[in-house]
Amino acid sequence: MSSAGSPSGATRFAQPPVVACSTRSTGASQNAALSSGGPSGPSRKRSRPLPDVAEAALIVHGGAGPIPESERALRQSAVERARDAGWALIRDDALGAAVAAVRHMEDEPLLNAGIGACLNRDGEVELDAGVMRGADLAAGGAAGLRDVRHPIDLALAVMRDGRHVLLAGVGASRFARDAGLEMCDPSIFVTDRKRQELVGGADTVGAVARDSEGRLAVAVSTGGITGKLPGRIGDSPVPGAGFYADDRFGAVCGTGEGEAFIRLGLARLMVLELEHGMDAEKVADGAVAMLGRVLNAQGGVIVIGRDGPPRAAFNTPAMPFAIAQ
Ligand code: ASP
């Protein structure tokens, strides 16, 4: 297992990478949607057969944002604990590993998910979560939650139920109760009101996993953005915006200005670029470059292709992440 923090393995807050996506080099990435190249003549690779044996990998992030210097090491440690919690389950399957990592981070008060999440304009916590399984494109999202102890559990229950993809608000709470999930008093999520009011939002948590059978999964959970209007739903519970997984090509997860991810359909676009043959590193860098270039937005992404190492990129001052493989 790499002790992570960067794709090269060092445990640290990586500096923002150079986000410009290389545009004119190889055929596969040339002119693709996440590059800044022109519209003509992309080289499109069609899907290849799935590998019999894949190299298991997990990448976990604790959110891209203006993280105060004083919290960086602590948040990095929290992300590494989550990575360990997920990696312990990677032998079972990618979905279990990704969900376990995110579930762990919902209990880390310095991260913007579950306990310690940021507050909306009314000083309340409203939580969103999402999950996707790349084998069959099953997806579940839950949004605007106030009393569901682990939002990721609800997203998973929505996915497994299969009737719908996205549930919100009181209906989502009722579904959670009926499913026997742990409910809680909303006050449990507020541990340090002053800090949660001030914390510069946009630091969702997420995990992407690939198991040794080549199955891919992604899980994500968030309090959204600080001072958001009550009822606002970001990209994190929306497949194709904040996350996406398809075993044939790869899985991705985003963090940052959710409205930008939704407008760009960025997660789906990233997996499309993997399908077209762009490698995970270029997809990550290209997505972040696109956020800045097209919508002047900030954020970060993590990516795992159907093979190769996990990748991360961000254009914010920091994004703690950790890798195991
Ligand atoms: N993407 C999240 C949202 O807009 C915020 C974040 O990444 O922290 O809800």
Image (cartoon, helix red, strand yellow):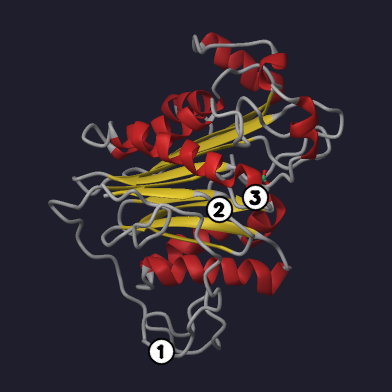
Amino acid found under the numbered disc labelled 2:
Met
For label 2, the SS is loop
Sequence-wise first label, 3 or 2: 3
Q: Position of residue 96 (x, y in %)?
A: 34, 31
Whole-Å distance between the Cαs marked 3 and 2? 12 Å
Kindly tell me whether mark 2's CB lies below 8 Å from ligand 1: no
Say if residue 274 shows up in the picture.
yes
Q: Position of residue 204 (x, y in %)?
A: 60, 42
Amino acid found under the numbered disc labelled 3:
Glu
Quickly name the residue at label 3: 69
- Mark 1 touching mark 3, by CB under 8 A? no
Q: Identify the residue at horizontal 19%, vertical 45% (top origin).
A: 213
Q: Nearer the viewer, residue 276 or 147?
A: 147
Sequence-wise first label, 2 or 1: 1
- Mark 2 touching mark 1, by CB under 8 A? no
Quickly name the residue at label 2: 319
Mark 1 or mark 3: which is in front? 3
Q: Position of residue 225 (x, y in %)?
A: 73, 42
Q: Nearer the viewer, residue 69 or 203?
A: 69
Q: Is residue 86 above or below residue 70?
A: above
Which residue reaches farthest front?
Answer: 70
Whole-Å distance between the Cαs marked 1 and 3? 37 Å
Which residue reaches farthest right?
Answer: 122
Q: Identify the residue at horizontal 44%, vertical 85% (top origin).
A: 30
Quickly name the residue at label 1: 25
Mark 2 or mark 1: which is in front? 2
Amino acid found under the numbered disc labelled 1:
Ser
- Residue 161 is left or right of residue 65, and the answer is left
Q: Is residue 136 above or below residue 176?
A: below
For label 1, the SS is loop
